[in-house]
Amino acid sequence: MATIPDKYMDLFVTKKAFAHIATAMPDGSPQVTPVWFDYTDGNIRINTARGRIKDRNMTANARVALSIVDPDNAYRYIQIRGRVVKVTEQGADQHIDSLAKKYMGVEKYPFHQAGVIRADTIDEMFDIATCLEAQPLPPGRRVAIVTNAGGPGLLAVDACEAAGLTVAPFSDATRARLADSSLRKPASATRSTRSPPRGPAPTGARSRRRSPRTRPTR
């Protein structure tokens, strides 16, 4: 088993560096995702929701590659090739909490309560929305809207208010944690209409999390 050179250990231990993990699609083409990670007992640990593309790829093919770039110097990086040696759901919620503390400075991963449903296609997204529409309504009339595009958010606000719901304003503390704190309701999580690489939005169901561990080989 290869070891991490001491001169790069700060990227694993002290700095909030992102890892870009590359997996292989079923047709052999590469797939890359930026992820949070930590380094424990010689293993690089990441956290993902079950059923996501990288999760499916790692289940079918354990070989992965990672690049980790110094957040203070984009020309300083380390690349790692290895295999997934363990995948478990045990302790995965606690693991994502520890990663949230490392990267966000919070004690709990903020999307635990609402959970996340991942849709890989537009058709799948509408299928999920149809399923959620048939679920019992939650109690109360207060709702909050977080979106990565202002236009659809405004449409959602109008629809909620037409249905007699109250679109609750965000507190200053919540607003400060959003990417753009200058907006009123609805709040936009990004300035772009494109989805962020790792920006889950609250939905009505919860995904079970998995915590794959990768062991460097060279």
Image: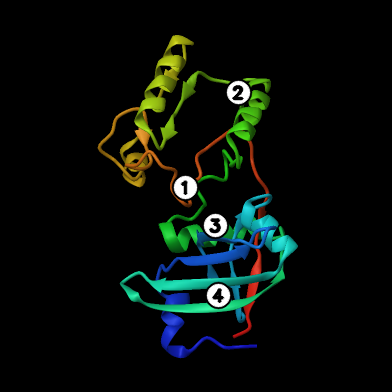
Question: Marks 3 and 4, how far apart in space?
Answer: 15 Å
Q: In which quarter of the image is residue 175?
A: top left
Q: Image check: 209 left or right of 72?
A: right
Front residue of 53 and 17:
53
The image shows residue 139, relative to residue 43, as above or below, that is above
Marks 3, 1: nearer the viewer: 1
Marks 4, 2: nearer the viewer: 4
Q: Which amino acid does label 1 sit on?
A: Gly
Marks 2, 1: nearer the viewer: 1
Q: Is mark 1 on a helix, strand or loop?
A: loop
Q: Which amino acid does label 3 sit on?
A: Asp
Question: Marks 2 and 1, how far apart in space?
Answer: 24 Å
Residue assigned mark 3: 97
Residue assigned mark 1: 199
Marks 1, 4: nearer the viewer: 1
Question: Marks 3 and 2, how far apart in space?
Answer: 26 Å
Residue 26 image offset from top left, x and y in percent? 70, 58
Q: Residue at x 41, y 67 (%)?
A: 16
Q: How crowded is mark 2: few (under 14 residues within 10 Å), some or many (20 or more)?
A: few
Question: Marks 3 and 1, how far apart in space?
Answer: 16 Å
Front residue of 81 and 138:
81
Q: Image check: 110 left or right of 210?
A: left
Residue assigned mark 4: 39
**Colour scheme shown:** rainbow
Residue assigned mark 2: 138
Residue with the most extreme left position: 182
Residue 79 image offset from top left, x and y in percent? 50, 78
Labels 2 and 1: the sequence-earlier one: 2
Labels 3 and 4: the sequence-earlier one: 4
